[in-house]
Amino acid sequence: MKLKQLLVAVGALSVLSFAQSASANEGGIELKHAEISVTDQAQIRRGLTVFTDVCMGCHSATYVTYKGLIDYPEIGLTREAVDELRGDYALTEGMRTDLSAEDAKGSYGKVPPDLSVIAYARKGGADYIYSVLTGFEHDPKGIIPDGNFNEYFPGHRIAMPDPMGWLDHDKEDTAQIEKDSQDVAAFLAFIADPHQNQRRAIGCWVLGFLLLLTLVLWRLKVEVWKDVKH
């Protein structure tokens, strides 16, 4: 009886997990692929510019300090550039929007989320960000107002207005909007874990050391036991 209950529980969890995964993209829509690199300084810097010029009108990234924009080699801004960017904010403060919570609720009905770890908080990461930014369309059913229907947002109704001007954009602007959207997706993917590149580099050295150590210990074992008959 217990085995049967266990199998039923496992089956239920599997169904729930599948349902949650499927709901990440409403209707099973496959996310667009974002061409990004969290080691590409030029792309990350361009993404920072898009973030400060567009996204920070409503969103913050409080886990990223202005000092981090100098210290992280993948960004590596000069002190002068950061001073110009931060204004009256302290160097050790996080990147905050000037939009107050009250004004945000009045305009959008809710407070826009902090984007510091949005790339890890949403299934699909950078692909999700890129898809949402370039996913504003007209509601085929005519129910959701223009500017609030997003093909890739769960439920399709999104409070965030079209930040990149994707809806009804001119065809000649498509490449630039896609590039800007991918750049900011790269920036957000990087700041979600700003030590990821350093960690990967250390991991490669550790794996190399362990491989070499394994070889040395194997040769030592052969040498120690060579005269012992089995």
Image (cartoon, rainbow, N blue to C red):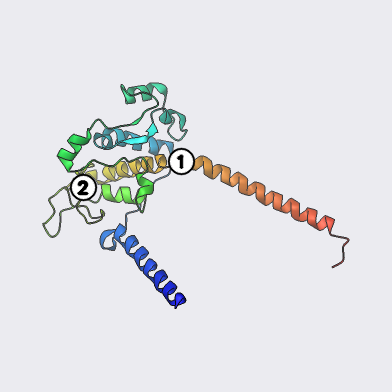
Under mark 1, the amino acid is Thr
> Would you call the spot at circle 2 few (<14 residues within 10 Å), some (14-19), or many (20 or more)?
few
| Horizontal and vertical percent position of residue 225 | 84, 59
Picture quarter with the C terminus: bottom right
Q: CA distance from mark 2 to mark 1?
A: 30 Å
Disc 2 or 1, which lies upstream in sequence? 1
**Image position of 59 with respect to 149: above or below:** above
What residue does disc 1 label?
Answer: 39
Instruction: For residue 34, say whether it is visible.
Output: no
| Element type at mark 1 | loop
Decide if residue 63 is on the left or right side of residue 101.
Answer: right
- In this rendering, is residue 80 above or below 21? above
Number of marks drawn:
2
Q: Secondary structure at mark 2?
A: helix
For residue 103, what is the image quadrant?
top left
Can residue 80 be seen here? The reply is yes
* Left or right: 153, with 3 as reference point: left
Tell which of 170 and 156 is nearer to you.
Answer: 156
- Residue at 21% across, 46% down: 166
Instruction: Mark 2 vs mark 1: give the one in front.
Output: 1
How packed mark 1 is, by other alpha carbons closer than 10 Å (few <14, some 14-19, many 20 or more), is some
Quadrant occupied by the N terminus = bottom left
Task: Identify the disc placed on residue 171.
Answer: 2
Q: Looking at the picture, which amino acid does disc 2 mark?
A: Lys
